[in-house]
Image: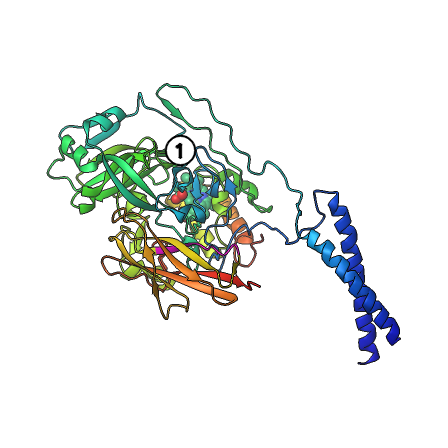
Amino acid sequence: MSVADRSFSRRGIFKALGVMTGGITLGRWLGSSAVAAQEPVQTKAIETFTGPGANPHWNSVGPYVAEPQKVPLILLTDRPVQLETPRHYFRTAFTPNEAFYVRWHLEGIPNTVDLKDWKLQIEGNVNNPLALSLPELMQKFKPVSLAAVNQCSGNSRSRLQPRVPGGQWGNGAMGNAMWTGVRLRALLEVAGVKSDSLQVQFQGLENGQGPKGLGSNLFLKSLDLGNPVLDECIVAYLMNGEPLPMLNGFPVRLVVPGYFATYWTKSLTWIRVLNSPDENFWMKTAYRIPDTPRGNTNPEDMKAGKVKTVPIERLPVRSFLIWPDGTSKIPAGMNIRLQGIAFSGFGRVNRVEVSEDGGKTWLPAELGEDHGPYSFRTWGMSWTAKSQGRHTLAVRATDEKGIVQPDEPVWNAGGYLWNMIERQEIVVGKAS
Amino acid sequence: MKKRVLAIFLVMCGLMMVVAVVFADLKKGYYRPAELGSLRQTALIELSPDSNYQVSAYPVPGADLVPGDGRQEVQTYCNTCHSPIYVTMQPPLPAATWEAEVNKMNKAYGAAIPEDTTQKIIRYLQAHYTVENRTP
């Protein structure tokens, strides 16, 4: 040991002594005080934005906000309101109404609905235009119930590379509910759709400050009358057996099972039968996907104008690990239960698998109760964190059409259809 | 010299035992000062049994736009159809994308912002919200 080394180590000792004496003093002082001057682990807020890389978090990074009829949810935008559901609310097959995500396009969203004046209008190319009150909807038509996932077209948009403008959702722009209401077909039957009709258009109470005729003034969506999904559509006045929260579309919203939420018009008030194709902004320009496998393309082809687009429709198969969520360490050797959800807009999820080795081998998970083809399906699997270290779990689902969740990213200009296999790092600590 | 080191070492061992006990205490009971009211619960609104179904006004915390030339214009012109949080929510975007976004607001959505103001807004967004210059 050289002289220099020795004096260094001695200084080290004095330093250590200093820290320890300080520790004792602080410890004494702490005994009589509730608030410490320093923290054992520094707590800091999450970053205020992510990018240009992919958002590394499960949810988006906004602050929590308390909105009417809601528990604190993650704020994307305040006017109009867009809120994301935090991860832990997906432990159950049905998402609580007060935690259900919110996505409006235009700032004129209802604070008040007077049911004395409100009527659901069925108009346009029909023989008997109708104006139905809520009691008429509830009493004159047979109620039907159906569990269905409502997922925003842009759910997980913050994963895309390169990033695209739009709502920077994490994974929480989705929810599952038991919807109860009236069959859309029953309403159309009573109204008598004329034979030359092509589409049916939906309009809610939402409106914006932009000029008439533009997408900034009205949010309008349409479906083809020949589309079989119309047979399954419900005009819902109950969500999980409760009236709809105002922010989720009180008094009624359209439910389009298996389809992205863009068609699920909130505060639905006008059902309009059309005899020419709907060419409004929200059909012709927005919510369109490349007419390619998985709606995938790249910025170069897009810019070169090579990409033909079609309206977005069904939800591709997805699955999520909800717990463990990476916020806590798991002691090695502890047998825990992995929990998650899966869904597909193309039919029931009939297989969920977990991989610990980056996708080389897959182990089957147990599926929870089947609430119907369009519902979240919970899954679980008992798992022992064998050795201390960092483990990565991947989850994938397969639906009854045999479509397996892919392990490749997707890119399109709208930031739609993300459904790549999800991964979660889990830190396993020494248990002794 | 060696004795002194040894003595210090022994004293330290003793201290370490004491400290171990004290530090065990330090491992709990830590709190930190924090501001109350960053997320207040909202009071219930009064409900009456009539046909009106009502919720309270939706809160607008406001967007924290970076100070700079053009900020005022964004706060005015980009606040009619939606709040400027639509800007701050975005990831850092290429300069060309910001130009395209502002043009989209004018053309597709009819924002009709005067040409010189449009250019000023584009310059502001390109000066503060791209990969090269966006700050937390």
- In screen coordinates, is A19 left or right of A178? right
Q: Nearer the viewer, residue A210 or B32?
A: B32
Q: Tally the numbered discs.
A: 1
- In screen coordinates, is A233 left or right of A152? left
Residue A241, image quadrant: top left
Image location (x, y in percent) of residue A180:
27, 36
Image location (x, y in percent) of residue B119:
50, 48
Image location (x, y in percent) of residue B21:
73, 56
Q: Nearer the viewer, residue A102 or A378?
A: A378
Q: In terms of secondary structure, where does tag 1 sit?
A: loop
Q: Nearer the viewer, residue B11 or A126?
A: B11
Residue at 79% in and 55% down: A22
**How would you rate the neighbour count of disc 1 (Cα within 10 Å): few for under 14, some for 14-19, many for 20 or more?**
some
Q: From the viewer's perspective, is residue A313 above or below residue A178? A: below
Residue at image mark 1: A108
Residue at 49% in and 48% down: B89
Residue at 32% in and 30% down: A251
Q: Amino acid at mark 1?
A: Gly
| Disc 1: host chain | A
Q: Which residues are magenta?
A: A319-328
Which residue is situated farthest in the bottom direction here? A1
Q: From the viewer's perspective, is residue B65 above or below residue B1? A: above
